[in-house]
Amino acid sequence: MLNVESLRLEFGGVVALKDVDFSVEMGELFAILGPNGAGKTSLFNCLSGLVKPKGSIQVNGNEVIGKKPHEIADMGIARTFQNLGLFGSMTVAENILVGSHLQIQGGAFTAAIRWPSVFRSERQARRNADELMELMNLLEVRDSVVDTLPYGIRKRVEIAKAVASKPSLLLLDEPVAGMNHEETETFVEYVLELKKQLGLTIVLIEHDVAMVMRIADRILALDFGEVIGLGTPAEIQQNERVIAAYLGATDESDAQTELLMEGAISE
Ligand SMILES: Nc1ncnc2c1ncn2[C@@H]1O[C@H](COP(=O)(O)OP(=O)(O)OP(=O)(O)O)[C@@H](O)[C@H]1O
Ligand SMILES: [Mg+2]
């Protein structure tokens, strides 16, 4: 459903992405792995129209490059951000309703004269938000102001907001960064359930190698904007370039390398 070809993105002299090629199948959980500055977020920015790269990105056969972010959202692509993309002073339910604005038919004119279809779609959006809150176990906090909630729950709200627009492709940028082990486990369960229930295709950027190895169908490994590996978790784990990219960089990377080499995927 997603086909990326010869993708190249430069910022002044910095080459953030260099000849990146890959495709993602419908229903896949596709992970992107790579050290800091590898180009992972830049890739998402290309996919969601925030920057304009060279090359081609097709979603279900339609070209994404050159389209505006809202046009790309209309094509069924939703994303979360590395930093929370929520309205902190609004409630959980309000945030999710904002996310479903795409689904509400009729522009300002229709809304102004209050056609029955607007009531209908408004009601539909509310029902949709309720269903999502139930699925993500957020009904209890539906009227809580987002800023007052623990990080793990806020991240769940963010995903519910992203999928409220009924996307077919969901892009998650390091969703478990800053979560403890238990929060991560819970979060992963919710994401997998959501994927199953809504038939989503997911592209996931993640530093947590053990988690990626466990849940991804396939992994793309980037380093300095280049693809250094593409394959199943088992293949990536054996990939010498991937292991080397994780060697000797930061302390965090060292720990991740150990995980890679120890066979974190055995479970
Ligand atoms: N707006 C920008 N202007 C200039 N350079 C940028 C910009 N955005 C990203 N870069 C550069 O592009 C490269 C890739 O950055 P990117 O944020 O995509 O990395 P990343 O893989 O997401 O890293 P992290 O794991 O830290 O989130 C880096 O060298 C970064 O400094
Ligand atoms: Mg990033």
Image (spheres, helix red, strand yellow):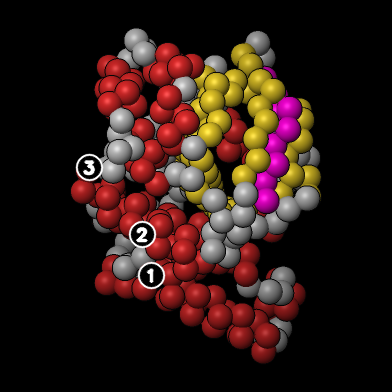
Is disc 1 in contact with disc 3, using a CB cutoff of under 8 Å?
no
Name the residue: 47% across, 68% down: 197
Q: Looking at the picture, does residue 15 appear above or below residue 170?
A: above
Q: Which residue is mark 1?
A: 135
Residue drawn 66% across the image and 20% down it: 18
Q: Amino acid at mark 2?
A: Tyr
Q: How would you classify the magenta stretch by its main secondary structure?
A: strand
Q: Mark 2 and mark 3 in contact (Cβ < 8 Å)?
A: no
Q: Residue at x 43, y 75 (%)?
A: 131
Secondary structure of the residue carrying numbered label 3: loop
Horizontal and vertical percent for residue 41? 53, 33
- Asked whether residue 134 is drawn in magenta, I would say no
Q: CA distance from mark 1 to mark 3?
A: 22 Å
Residue underneath mark 2: 190
Residue 32 appears at what percent x and percent y?
50, 35
Above or below, 148 relative to 68: below
Please say if the residues under marks 1 and 2 sit with CB atoms less than 8 Å apart: yes
Mark 1 lies on a secondary structure that is helix
| Mark-to-mark CA distance, 3 and 2 | 16 Å
Task: Report, in whole angstroms, how far the alpha carbon at label 1 lies from the one at label 2.
Answer: 8 Å
Q: Position of residue 252 (x, y in %)?
A: 29, 22
Quick one: label 1 or label 3, which is nearer the N terminus? 1
* Span shown in magenta: 1-11
Tell me the amino acid under the disc marked 3: Asn
Residue identified by numbered label 3: 180
Amino acid tagged 1 = Leu
